[in-house]
Image (cartoon, rainbow, N blue to C red):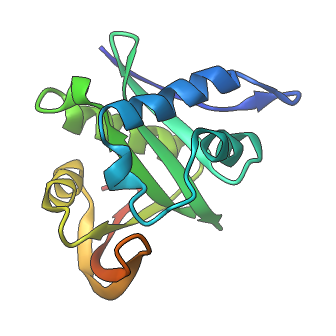
Amino acid sequence: MISTMRYEKNDGIPNFGNSFLVNLFDRMVDEGIDKIVFRDRLDMSADRWVWLFVSGYARLFLACHHSRVDAIAWLTKIEHKSCHIHFCIYDSARGKNSFELGKAVCRDIFNSGINCITAFVPVDNEKMLHYSEKVGFKNIGIFPDYYYIAKQKITIDAHAIYLPKGV
């Protein structure tokens, strides 16, 4: 059974503690996913990751299968009723029900008041582009030199994708 949860605060009290957020980050590092989702961010750390959500800069959504967190999505650039999504599928979900997890997260995002989800996928991350299209995202086209990878001092083009509510 797939379920979703959100990081939320009620009267200033978060429903997940900082240690839970750090565990999500550490799991990305342990599985090597951080090198993919944060490769354009030299400054990403567990402390900065926690800050994203505690400060309200980003909104976190979790997708669970049998109570185990298998995928996470965090939203940035939330304006009007649109947002930019970042997505991570943990090893426990790859090749299994990952598409259903992605669709469940997107439904929860739409239920939170968002009408359009956007993202940029590096052109060399064909797996994520394929995954996004299976979840329902449409490819608008390629933005040249979208990502700057400071560590390598290179730029990478990115596919611009979007998913409108109701699709």
In the rendered image, residue 19, in percent from the top left (x then y), is placed at: 64, 21
Extreme-top residue of the structure: 66
Extreme-left residue of the structure: 95
Quarter where residue 6 is shown:
top right
In the rendered image, residue 41, in percent from the top left (x then y), is placed at: 49, 62
In the rendered image, residue 151, in percent from the top left (x then y), is placed at: 41, 70
> With respect to residue 53, does 163 lie above or below?
below
> With respect to residue 39, does 92 lie above or below?
above
- Left or right of 50? Residue 124 is left
Is 66 in front, or is 52? 52
Is 44 in front, or is 63? 44
Is 137 in front, or is 61? 61
Q: Is residue 21 visible?
A: yes
User: What residue lies at 66% left-to-right and 39% top-to-bottom?
Assistant: 50
User: What residue lies at 57% left-to-right and 45% top-to-bottom?
Assistant: 45
Quarter where residue 138 is shown:
bottom left
Q: Is residue 166 visible?
A: no
Q: Report the number of discs.
A: 0
User: What residue lies at 34% left-to-right and 74% top-to-bottom?
Assistant: 152
Is 46 in front, or is 92? 46
Extreme-bottom residue of the structure: 144
- Left or right of 1? Residue 165 is right
Indicate the quadrant containing the N terminus: top left, top right, bottom left or bottom right: top left
Quarter where residue 65 is shown:
top left
- Left or right of 156? Residue 83 is right
